Amino acid sequence: MTDAQWVLEQALQVARSIWDAGDRSLALRSIAEAMAKAGKWEQALQVARSIEDEEKRSSALSSVAEAMAKAGVREQA
């Protein structure tokens, strides 16, 4: 596991422990976007889909799809 992967995993654990659903959704959206930018498509999609807030989930999924399209991963985006 690289340092970047470790940091993302730690951030994910912390985000999931946030009590407030709105704040948790914001944190998870940021992590999904960071994972997508790092090329961790499946993880990014999994995190984005786990977001409770519909608006933030939609935003995260859009960001992941956009990053995938820019990287040429169009079949899943």
Image (cartoon, rainbow, N blue to C red):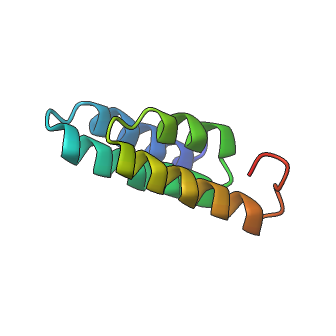
Q: Position of residue 6 (x, y in %)?
A: 49, 41
In this orientation, which residue lies closer to the viewer: 44 or 8?
44
Instruction: Report the residue that reaches farthest toward the bottom.
Output: 70
Q: At 66% from the left edge and 63% from the top edge, which residue is drawn?
A: 67
Q: Position of residue 27 (x, y in %)?
A: 31, 49
Q: What is the quadrant of the N terminus in the image?
A: top right
Left or right of 25 on screen, residue 61:
right
Left or right of 22 on screen, residue 65:
right
Left or right of 73 on screen, residue 59:
left
Q: At 39% from the left edge and 38% from the top edge, which residue is drawn?
A: 51
The image quarter containing residue 12 is top left
- How many numbered marks are there? 0
Q: At 44% from the left edge and 32% from the top edge, which residue is drawn?
A: 50
Instruction: Report the residue that reaches farthest toward the left.
Output: 20
Give the answer, above or below, for where 19 lies relative to 63. Answer: above
Give the answer, above or below, for where 73 lies relative to 41. Answer: below
Q: At 85% from the left edge and 49% from the top edge, which residue is drawn?
A: 75
Left or right of 59 on screen, residue 45:
right
In this orientation, which residue lies closer to the viewer: 75 or 40?
75
Q: Position of residue 3 (x, y in %)?
A: 53, 49
Give the answer, above or below, for where 4 lies relative to 52. Answer: below
Q: Position of residue 14 (x, y in %)?
A: 28, 37
